[in-house]
Amino acid sequence: MQRYSRQVEKDMKNLYRSLSEKDRRRYAAVEAEKLGYGGIAYVSELFGCEPDTIRRGQADVDALPDDAALGRVRKKGRAE
């Protein structure tokens, strides 16, 4: 399986952190799909998310352009 360079990984992580929760899982799903076999494990490790999150993102992407949550973004919780 292809792995990205350290610079690309850094850029991907920065982009990932800037996205909403829904967009993060969808982005992770698309990246994993591009890589093929082993992509979910690699992207899960890269972004520090669960493989099930990526699988949920795949279901989200498969359902597009229909999106029941279109325009909704969860507010960030308070840090304590």
Image: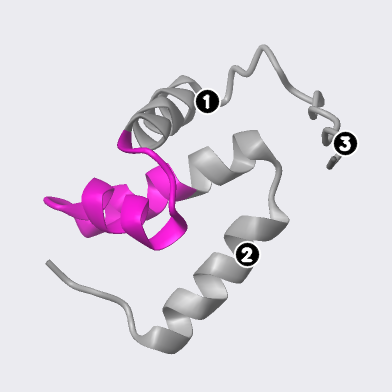
Q: Secondary structure at mark 1?
A: loop
| Number of residue marks | 3
Q: Residue at x 51, y 39 (%)?
A: 25
Q: CA distance from mark 3 to mark 2?
A: 22 Å
Number of the front mark, 3 or 2? 3
Q: Quadrant of the C terminus?
A: top right
Q: Residue at x 85, y 31 (%)?
A: 75
Magenta-colored stretch includes residue 16: no
Name the amino acid type tagged 2: Leu
Label 1 vs 2, first from the N-terminus: 2
**Residue with the mark numbered 2:** 15
**Residue with the mark numbered 3:** 78
For residue 72, side relative to residue 21 (left or right): right
Q: Which residue is the extreme one toward the top?
A: 68
Q: Residue at x 62, y 41 (%)?
A: 23
Name which quarter of the figure residue 73 lies in.
top right
**Residue with the mark numbered 1:** 64
In-front residue for pair 18/60: 18
Residue numbers of the magenta segment: 28-51
Q: Residue at x 50, y 48 (%)?
A: 27
Query: Would you call the spot at circle 3 few (<14 residues within 10 Å), some (14-19), or many (20 or more)?
Result: few
Name the amino acid type tagged 1: Leu
Label 3 vs 2, first from the N-terminus: 2
For residue 19, side relative to residue 5 (left or right): right
Query: Would you call the spot at circle 1 few (<14 residues within 10 Å), some (14-19), or many (20 or more)?
Result: few
Q: Do callouts 3 and 1 mark residues in contact (Cβ within 8 Å)? A: no
Q: Secondary structure at mark 3?
A: loop
**Magenta: main secondary structure:** helix
Label 3 vs 1, first from the N-terminus: 1
Q: Which mark is residue 24?
A: none
In-front residue for pair 65/75: 75
Name the amino acid type tagged 3: Arg
